[in-house]
Amino acid sequence: MSDTGSSDESSITQPPAPALGTQTLLDRPWFRRGVITVLLGLAVGFGAYAVGNSVTGSDNVSTSLPDSVERLIPTSGSEVLKQSEVGVDLALGYDAYLIINGVEIRDVSSRDNGDGLTRVLTPDGYTVTYVPGPGKRVEQLEPELNQITAMVWRQESGPETAVPVFWTFNAA
């Protein structure tokens, strides 16, 4: 009579050992080490690339300016006075409005109750700027870090298609 409560060790089978000469590359220690070394090297390389191309701190700017923006005013990472002009030079056929530290500035100063935005037509396009001042929506730039976002669009498409371009700088 067989005992169903105990296990029969003879019924456990081990997988057969590979025959000599049938090892795969993954069975070879030197190959595994090489693959691990290459993968670690790639990880370190991608990490270095990411750190080198990251945008942080006072250099915080859209990674690449679109063709529509020719110049940021002031330049990213610069230091300016609290009453300095901010804005963008745009290529021909583009328009924009500004968001200064979270405050949207859309209306030109010539409109009744306008926000104080200025649009100047140049031979190359528009220059859209704002100068903080007493009684305006933004009276002065923040001490230290300021973030400006220019919402830029093709004039024929309208502001609904605006693309944000942002940068930061310091004010003293």
Image (spheres, rainbow, N blue to C red):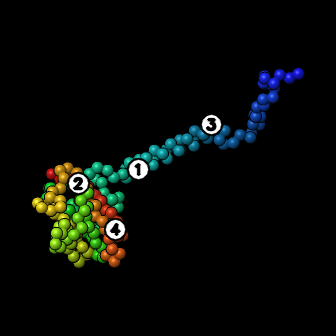
Q: Which residue is mark 1?
A: 50
Residue 65 percent across, percent down from the top left: 33, 63
- In what element is the residue under mark 4? loop
N-terminal-most mark, 1 or 3: 3
Which element carries disc 2, helix, strand or loop? strand
Residue 36 placed where, x, y %? Answer: 55, 41
Using residue 148 as the reference point, say whether residue 22 is left or right of it: right
Label annotation for residue 29: 3
Left or right side of 130 for 158: right
* Kind of element beneath mark 1: helix
- In this view, 68 is above or below 13: below
Mark 2 burial class by Cα count in 10 Å: few <14, some 14-19, many 20+: some
Estimate how packed mark 3 is, as few (under 14), some (14 to 19) or many (20 or more) residues with alpha carbons within 10 Å. few
Give the class, few, some or many, for how many residues have Cα within 10 Å of label 1's Cα (few <14, many ≥20): few
Nearer the observer: mark 4 or 3; the answer is 4
- The total number of labels drawn is 4
Instruction: Calculate the distance from the C-alpha at mark 1 to the C-alpha at mark 3.
Output: 32 Å
Which amino acid does the dot numbered 1 rest on? Ala
Residue position for label 2:
146
The residue most toward the front is 113
- Looking at the rendering, which quadrant does residue 96 occupy? bottom left
How many angstroms separate mark 4 from mark 3 (CA)? 56 Å
Residue found at x 31% / y 75% = 155
Name the amino acid type tagged 4. Answer: Ala
In this view of the protein, can residue 88 be seen by the observer? no
The residue that mark 4 highlights is: 162
What's the amino acid at mark 2?
A: Asn
